Amino acid sequence: MVILKAIGAFFVKIWRWIKETAWVQPLLIVGTIFAVIFSIPYITKWMQSFAGEGNGQFFKNYDLSLQNERFVLGEVNSDADKMTQSLYEYTTKAYDDAQTKTTTANDYVGFTKQYGEKFFVVFYKEENTASNNIETGLKYLSEKWDNAQYNMSANDDTFIPFSLKAVNTSYIADNDNDEEIKLAGSPSAFQRYLYTNSNLFNVAGPELYKASYQTRASVSENSYDQFALNNTSSSTSDPLKDFPLPCVCLVDFTQKAISQGRAGLSEILFTVSGDSDLSRATLLLNMWNHTDDYSTTNLFTKQL
């Protein structure tokens, strides 16, 4: 008790000195103002973490983990590996079947029963403006999903809920502590993922270039080469490091997509432009609907 009184008396003396010393007060006021100004970015980030806005907070709800990622071709360990390898199996089937258009949704049930019939896949980086644009657009779209009042109507034959799988390419897996992985210049968890699952990207890149959502005139051909892990224009000559980030893809195994030869990993956007959450969400919904960015024509009605 005596100690507490002594501490209290010490602070009372400091406060009395501040009140009686005129030149200290302006300094404290100015210091407080600067402290508040410099704290604003941290306060904003803290508030966003509760709102799930930007910086990967919303994406964490849909995380497809890279935990246990190894740098061994064909060794499937992480959740992201398992989904991607299954997607490769059924996407290659869909690409092969696109010419006949005789398959049905039942032919892909091995994938859709576990992962869903239709969903977005986003590869994003933390603390990245372009990734944040994709994130806020997808968050807005999820909140207004299939809401005609906001002109957010999906054109699926039956209702399909908003669905997303997000891969954090900045992720540092626990096994990065392994001595083997800690070597200088060793690949990141995401680079190891690309190496393990290169077969999907090798196959999908050329197909997305031919039937991309955004017309080829608006997207650099290099982006598709980089996505396919086949970038010959880069001075780094390291396709694992040249992968275009961020990017958002659409996986579609609905009967409508199958009948039109558009099933599997079917669309990609390398940027989500727009000056508002609404405009970015609209762009993403257009991709979900396979609608041409430069017209209101539904690509499902076109001769593919």
Image: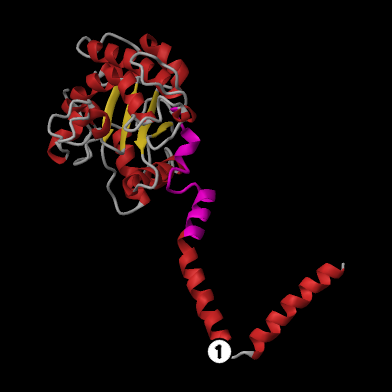
Residue 254 rendering spot, x and y as whole percentages? 35, 20
Q: What secondary structure is marked by label 1?
A: loop
Note whether 260 is above or below 127 in the view shown.
Answer: above
Is the C terminus in the top left, top right, bottom left or bottom right quadrant? top left
Left or right side of 68 for 25: right
Q: Which residue corresponds to the image point at 19% horizontal and 41% vertical from the top-left?
A: 294
Note whether 89 is above or below 179 in the view shown.
Answer: above
Note whether 223 is above or below 70 in the view shown.
Answer: below
Instruction: Between residue 171 and residue 81, name the one nearer to us.
Output: 171
Is the N terminus in the top left, top right, bottom left or bottom right quadrant? bottom right
Instruction: Between residue 44 and residue 32, name the one nearer to us.
Output: 32
Q: Which residue corresponds to the image point at 13% horizontal and 29% vertical from the top-left?
A: 232
Left or right side of 245 for 19: right
Give the residues drawn in magenta, as a range: 42-66
Residue 175 seen? yes
Residue 80 rendering spot, x and y as whole percentages? 42, 24
Does the magenta-highlighted stretch encompass residue 65?
yes
Left or right side of 140 for 228: left
Does the magenta-highlighted stretch encompass residue 32?
no
Quarter assignment of residue 151: top left
Q: How is the image coloured?
A: secondary structure
Note whether 46 is above or below 253 in the view shown.
Answer: below
Few, some or many C-alpha atoms within 10 Å of disc 1 (few <14, some 14-19, many ≥20)?
few
Quarter assignment of residue 217: top left
Identify residue type, mark 1: Trp
Q: Which residue corresponds to the image point at 43% horizontal and 47% vertical from the top-left?
A: 55
Outermost residue, right side: 1
Q: Which residue corresponds to the image point at 53% horizontal and 82% vertical from the top-left?
A: 27
Residue on which disc 1 sits: 23
Residue 263 seen? no
Residue 42 rendering spot, x and y as whole percentages? 49, 58
